Image (cartoon, rainbow, N blue to C red):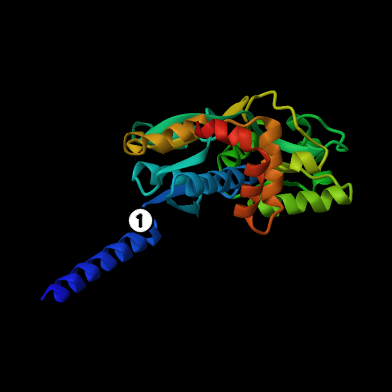
Amino acid sequence: MKKTKKLVVLFAAVMFTLSVGLAGCAPKEETIEIGYVNWACATANTHLVKVILEDEFDVNVNIRDMEAGLMWQSLETKDLDFMVTAWLPGTHANYYAAVKDSVEDLGPLYEGAAIGLVVPEYVTIDSIEELNENADKFEGQIIGIDAGAGIMGAAETALTEYGLTDMELLTSGDAAMTAELQRAYENEEWVVVTGWAPHWKFAKFDLKFLDDPKNVFGGEETINVMARDDFSAEKPEIADFLSSIFLTPAQLGELIGVVSEADDMEQAARDWIEDNRDLVDGWLS
């Protein structure tokens, strides 16, 4: 009888030990949903935050490449937890206005962002006003990105405001736009694209924004972290971390370059973190 009791106690102890061990190996149950648009800066920022959250906060992170309007709507419906690519006050103004009562602004991670029409430095015009009279040199085309992007709406307005009747705005994507820019640049052909900074193309190519005297594209903007309205209340530690992120032009430019050129974007983000450990630790403290 005593032997039986000892076996039962031993069995219970073994099962307890196994259960503790299995619990320690159990998969993470919590998943954070992040949305982003497939722009170089948004892709880099999103992968950076994903890696930090998984490594430092012990959560799963699912990132979703989305059209800008749907991304903002998904914050309102709480299908997303947050995004790190809100361009304010101009580029995403309409999206923000539609959902502003259902989202929470966690502050800027970058200042001095800009959008507009961009040409190589060797192009001998300096203003959007000069595009129409030189339309043939650009083959009558402005190379754009995805149709839902805020910059495309501004570019459509520019066509009207500047009377660019001989120019057509083409829809493509960030990768296709930069590929066409690179092809034209290497052949010293005239090309005009919808462009924004920060973007790795300004480090790789010698480019300039065309002057915008009618201010269609607005002034300098910030890139903000925007969350669903109850995110800070539910995840205060993560919200504090997100509010602490801030990058200088040099830091973000380096991050964009590292991530955009990598086959493994998450590993590239981890490498950047290790090279900038003091900065990242400051965000986490």
Provide residue 282's location: percent of width, then percent of height: 56, 30
Secondary structure category for the residue under label 1:
loop
Instruction: Reply above or below: 189 against 213.
Output: below
In this rendering, would 122 be left or right of 76? Answer: right
Residue depicted at x 58% and y 44% = 42
Query: Would you identify the image quadrant in which residue 227 lies?
Result: top left
Instruction: Reply above or below: 175 against 156.
Output: below
Asked if residue 36 shows in the view, the reply is no
Residue depicted at x 44% and y 34% = 96
> Of 168 and 106, which appears nearest the observer?
106
> Which residue is identified by label 1?
29
Asked if residue 6 shows in the view, the reply is yes
Q: Amino acid at mark 1?
A: Glu
> Of 87 and 264, which appears nearest the observer?
264
**Outermost residue toward the front in this view:** 2
How many labels, in total? 1
Q: Residues within 10 Å of mark 1 (few under 14, many from 20)?
A: few
Provide residue 185's location: percent of width, then percent of height: 84, 47
Instruction: Tell me the quarter of the image containing the N terminus.
Output: bottom left
Provide residue 99's location: percent of width, then percent of height: 38, 36
> Of 180 and 106, which appears nearest the observer?
106
